[in-house]
Image (cartoon, rainbow, N blue to C red):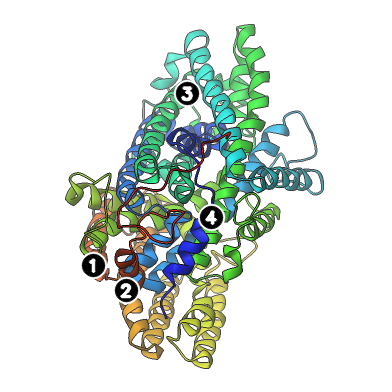
Amino acid sequence: MAVSTRDADAADRKLDRRMSVWQLFFLSMGGIIGSGWLFAALSAAATAGPAAIVSWVIGGVLVLLVAFNYAEIAGMLPRSGAIVRYPHLTHGGFTGFILGWTYLLSAVSVPAIEAEAVVTYASTYIHGIVNPVNSELIWPGGILFGIGLMIVFFIINYVGIRFLSQFNSFITGWKFVIPILTVILLFVFDLHAKNYASFGGFAPLGWAPVLGAVASSGIVFSFLGFRQALDYGGEARNPQRDVPIATIASVLAGLALYVLLQAAFIGGIKWGAFGIHAGDWAALKAAGSAAKDAPFYVVLKAAGPALLGGFATILLIDAFVSPTGTGYVYLGTSARTVYGLSIVGYLPKFFQMILARFRIPWIALIASAVVGCLFFLPLPSWYELVGIITGATVLTYILGPVAVHVLRRTAPSLTRPFRLPAAGLIGPAGFVGALMIVYWSDFEELAIIYAAVFVALPLFAWYYAPRKGWVNPLSGAILGLVFLVLWIIVQRWGQWALVASPLTLAHPAFPVFYFTTIILVAGFTGALYYLCNAEGRQAVSSTWWLIYLLLAVYGISYYGAYGPAALLNPSKPSGLPFPADLLVVIMVGLLSYGWAIHSGYETEEIKAIVEGGTAVITDEPSAPVGAPASPAPQLGK
């Protein structure tokens, strides 16, 4: 039983399609300029020194390559909750479920992380809300403060996209001005040029950390907001033109802003203000650093001119505005993600319910807010969580470059207002670039991501596959239960996930753990294939490239330059040294990229879209393929 495109279109048609290109751009920029600009500059400098400037350039370029690929797809098939719907259209239910679940994990956590950023900065003048040692929120003050912010995020989204987009345009304007003024003031009044090269050179910690900083220090996390235009695409006035423009423009603008901020932060450091020795870059983020909870505030406050000290107070106001603005945008994205997963059948249909008055997916919004609040439980600080969120999110982006080629083969007749030039080069570059970001995440972060991703496989066997008629419900229940029990046992034994204190060094029996992980995941996939009917087997078969890719990168991450095997004995690291490890990842990525394109097929859903002429959702029940959307009422009328 295929997902009914008629039902999906009926739900999409109830959404409020009024946003202009500027409002889409401001939504994406609202996602980009958030807690990242307040914390990532310090985290990147602590990881890579002055060469963190290069890390921002690399991260921005890699995200831009991914955005270019999604621009073609989003212009052709604009949908709300787009990123979790595209894999289903190109590779069927099993690939779509794995990537959709992974994207959901990252989407629902970001609003809480942004709220945590507000509370963390507020701890500089409100005591007793954040643990000064590990920057975790304290009960009751810190956690209740965070929950209160989530309620504010919910209200802003609940009153509809019309209010959200107009309010966000104003807030994002403020969020542009404050970082730009920060850059100007630091460059003009308090630039210490010696910080760029006098303490061990431009790259005092080496070049491998420059690449590692891209994923683990909040750099790519800061750019992830570009996806807002994609996930709100079904609520745009002219989506085929505006979504690609807003997507690409937001990455370019964010890249320019963040490079300047990083350069200004490094040049503005007064080492005494941070309570560390001059040139001790790694100590910037240490527990004893006086500025880890409010880095730009401390830099400005320590500057000589009174003007900068006064502006530091304004920065504390922005430390509330910027993450708050990003938090409510991401809560809306999270709701669209839940909505999109429901549209393709991975979640119950009631998540598609649209509130008639404000035309928003209200049950999905409530669920996103409630689940988001769970992330206020005792968890790592902002600095540690951003690496996990980044890895999980970027892992889902690998499908974009693949989908461009699959949809050109399976849906050639659909209109593409933006057609990716040099797709044969930009496609694999975007795929490998996204894979590199995943690899540059610490192995410990990947271990947590993989544990959370694969633990959802039983849900597929229990809910989606039987509901589609692919497997017998009893067989699916047994398969899911056996895998779940074994997966929990193995993860507990591995000590990287599902334990109170995750392992940070090499595991004495990692080969056994890794081999067991391969057997479990591949065994579940093989058993699912055996139990499925012909339709289900096609969907499972088209997922083997993803299973191979995930498991291969897992092993390389452990033995590569960023894994525990290298950290255990840095002078004589075992496994793959830098940059040989990068070459191996590139080869694995290119093999997976070709395999993924070959595995894509004409799913029933994409076939129905092409035949039914539903490339763009209009107010009418049907429209010719590629036809522009009907004019929507103007905002304010």
> In terms of sequence position, does the residue under pointer 2 or pointer 1 come before the other?
2
Residue 616, x across and y down, in percent = 38, 54
Q: Looking at numbered disc 2 in the image, what kind of residue is underneath it?
A: Trp
What residue did someone put label 3 on? 266
- Mark 2–mark 4 contact, CB under 8 Å? no
| Crowd class of label 1 (few under 14; some 14 to 19; many from 20; radius 10 Å) | some
Numbered disc in front, either 2 or 4: 4
Q: Which residue is mark 1?
A: 595
Answer whether residue 441 is visible to the viewer in this image.
yes
> Which residue has dot 2 on it?
544
Disc with the residue nearer the chain's start (3 vs 4) = 3
- Mark 1 or mark 3: which comes first in sequence? 3
Q: Mark 3 or mark 2, which is nearer the start of the sequence?
A: 3
Which residue carries the number 4 mark? 336
Between the C-alphas of marks 1 and 3, the distance is: 43 Å
User: In terms of secondary structure, where does tag 4 sit?
Assistant: helix
Q: Amino acid at mark 1?
A: Trp
**Cα gap from disc 1 to disc 4, whole angstroms:** 30 Å
Q: Residue at x 41, y 35 (%)?
A: 250
Say if mark 2 contacts mark 1, CB within 8 Å.
yes
Crowding at label 4, few (<14), some or many (≥20) Cα neighbours within 10 Å? many
